[in-house]
């Protein structure tokens, strides 16, 4: 879900090490949405395993981050000047990270899909009053862009939707 961490892992060595260890041990890429409180912004990065040639060891590395495209200014999030949305590399695939309200704008999802995202990942923490609408937005986004969408929410409506918007 959005803001799974309240620290940028790239600036927190113990957190980064724990994430790298988890990705390496599981052999899985981890999408990590976080809120950088000192900067007042949300972003995502991927921690991807990297098998070492000629060795049984697997290491993992953190990618650069991608900022939330639609900050919620009324909650104190800062924004402006965000780069164009781009997917994050994730162990042979590309993931289009959508944070919070990013999933309500099909233009953001279309941009990351056009840039090569194989999967959209919507990380959010919905309010009860908006949960039903956010689920509908996620389904419509998957269908309109033609890309599968994995939606993670703290309390409501975590699901995976196919390219047609149907729940898998």
Image (cartoon, rainbow, N blue to C red):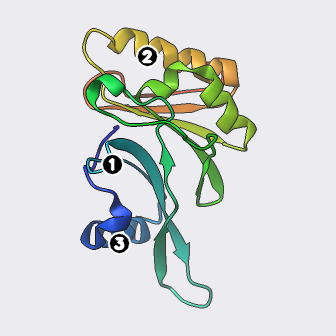
The answer to which quarter of the image holds residue 71 is top left
Sequence order check, earlier mark of 2 and 3: 3
The answer to which quarter of the image holds residue 25 is bottom left
Q: Kindly identify which residue carries mark 2.
A: 135
- Relative horizontal placement of residue 38, taking residue 92 as reference (left or right): left
User: Residue 140: which numbered mark, if any?
Assistant: none
Q: Position of residue 31 (x, y in %)?
A: 45, 50
**Mark 3 vs mark 1, CA separation in Å:** 26 Å
- The relative height of residue 166 versus residue 102 in the rendered view (above or below) is above
Give me the residue at 33% from left, 48% from top: 39
Q: Kindly identify which residue carries mark 3.
A: 21
Q: Position of residue 2 (x, y in %)?
A: 34, 38
Residue 123 or 39: which is nearer the viewer?
A: 39
Secondary structure state at the residue bearing disc 1: loop
- Relative horizontal placement of residue 158, taking residue 51 as reference (left or right): left
Q: Kindly identify which residue carries mark 1.
A: 39
**Mark 2 vs mark 3, CA separation in Å:** 33 Å
Q: Position of residue 79 (x, y in %)?
A: 44, 36
Secondary structure state at the residue bearing disc 3: helix
Image quadrant containing the N terminus: top left
Q: Tell me whether the residue at label 2 lies in contact with that at label 3, contact meaning CB atoms closer than 8 angstroms.
A: no
- The relative height of residue 51 versus residue 156 in the rendered view (above or below) is below
């Amino acid at each position: 879900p959005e803001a799974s961490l309240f620290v940028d892992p790239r600036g927190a060595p113990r957190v980064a090490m724990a994430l790298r260890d988890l990705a390496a041990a599981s052999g899985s890429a981890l999408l990590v949405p976080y809120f950088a409180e000192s900067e007042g912004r949300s972003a995502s990065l991927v921690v991807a395993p990297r098998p070492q040639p000629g060795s049984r060891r697997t290491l993992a590395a953190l990618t650069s981050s991608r900022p939330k495209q639609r900050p919620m200014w009324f909650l104190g999030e800062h924004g402006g000047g965000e780069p164009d949305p781009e997917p994050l590399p994730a162990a042979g695939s590309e993931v289009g990270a959508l944070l919070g309200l990013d999933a309500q704008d099909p233009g953001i999802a279309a941009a990351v899909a056009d840039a090569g995202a194989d999967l959209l990942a919507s990380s959010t923490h919905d309010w009860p009053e908006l949960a039903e609408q956010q689920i509908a937005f996620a389904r419509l986004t998957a269908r309109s862009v033609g890309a599968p969408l994995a939606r993670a929410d703290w309390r409501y409506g975590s699901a995976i939707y196919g390219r047609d918007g149907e729940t898998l």
